[in-house]
Image: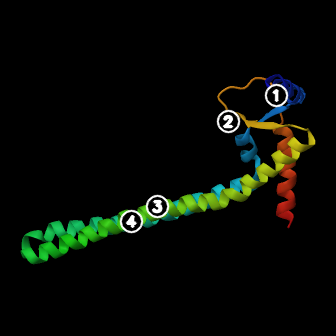
Amino acid sequence: MKKGLLILVLVFGGINMNAQTKIAHINSQELLDTLQSRKDAMAKLQKFEEEGVQELQEMNKSFEAAYIRYQQNEKDMTPVIQQMEQEKLQKKQQALQTRQQELEQQMQIYGQELNKPILDLVQTAVNNVADSKKISYVLDETVTLYFKGGVDITKEVMTELLKLEKELMGK
């Protein structure tokens, strides 16, 4: 029985070992850098970030002005008024911190929203080229510690990617 199982494993295992596996690699950063849609998305994200920074700077100026007023008038305030003004300052500072966290989260979500269709387009282009060239695995050079050999299909994927982007922009 054991000999029979061993023979079956060797026979069927040998079949899989004879199957040819083709490995290719791409440079995803090079692909992304050539896409106009990526450049547009980065510009939108940059604008969103600049608007957020401006909003935070305005909030910070308001807080600093209130703090300076508090320091200038602190000596003339009663303890109750001092307490109330300190609480107002704390609320302003908390609002500033909360808004900063909200903007960071919104920027991350917006970035993902902008990048998803671009990354889907890259994946489609990679799939199309890999299928046409009968490639089993495609590795990304930018995240691979070491690679030697394999087929560089960056140019083919770039051609396919630009074609897909042009079709998408035409719609």
Q: Earlier in the sequence, mark 1 or mark 3?
A: 1
**Residue at the location (25% across, 68% down)?**
90
Question: Which of label 3 and label 2 is nearer to you?
Answer: 2
- C-alpha distance separating marks 1 and 2: 44 Å
Q: Position of residue 28 (x, y in %)?
A: 72, 41
Please indicate whether residue 80 sits to the left or right of residue 69 in the image.
Answer: left
Q: Amino acid at mark 3?
A: Val
The type of residue carrying mark 4 is Thr
Does label 4 or label 1 sit earlier along the sequence?
A: 1
Q: Earlier in the sequence, mark 1 or mark 2?
A: 1
How many numbered marks have been drawn onto this rendered protein structure? 4
Q: Is residue 77 visible?
A: no
Identify the residue under disc 3: 53
The residue beneath circle 1 is 5
Would you call the spot at circle 2 few (<14 residues within 10 Å), some (14-19), or many (20 or more)?
Answer: few
Question: Who comes first in sequence, dot 3 or dot 2?
Answer: 3
Find residue 5 and report its horizontal and vertical position in percent: 82, 28
User: Are the residues flagged by discs 3 and 4 in contact, CB closer than 8 Å?
Assistant: no
Disc 4 marks which residue? 98
User: Element type at marker 1?
Assistant: helix
Which mark sits nearer the N-terminus, 4 or 2?
4
Dot 2 corresponds to which residue?
A: 142
Which of labels 3 and 4 is toward the front? 4
The numbered dot on residue 64 is: none
The label nearer to you, 1 versus 3, is: 1
Q: Quadrant of residue 30?
A: top right
Instruction: Mark 3 or mark 4: name the one nearer the start of the chain.
Output: 3
Disc 2 residue type? Thr
Q: Residue at coordinates 56% horizontally, 63% vertically from top-left?
A: 48
Mark 2: secondary structure: helix
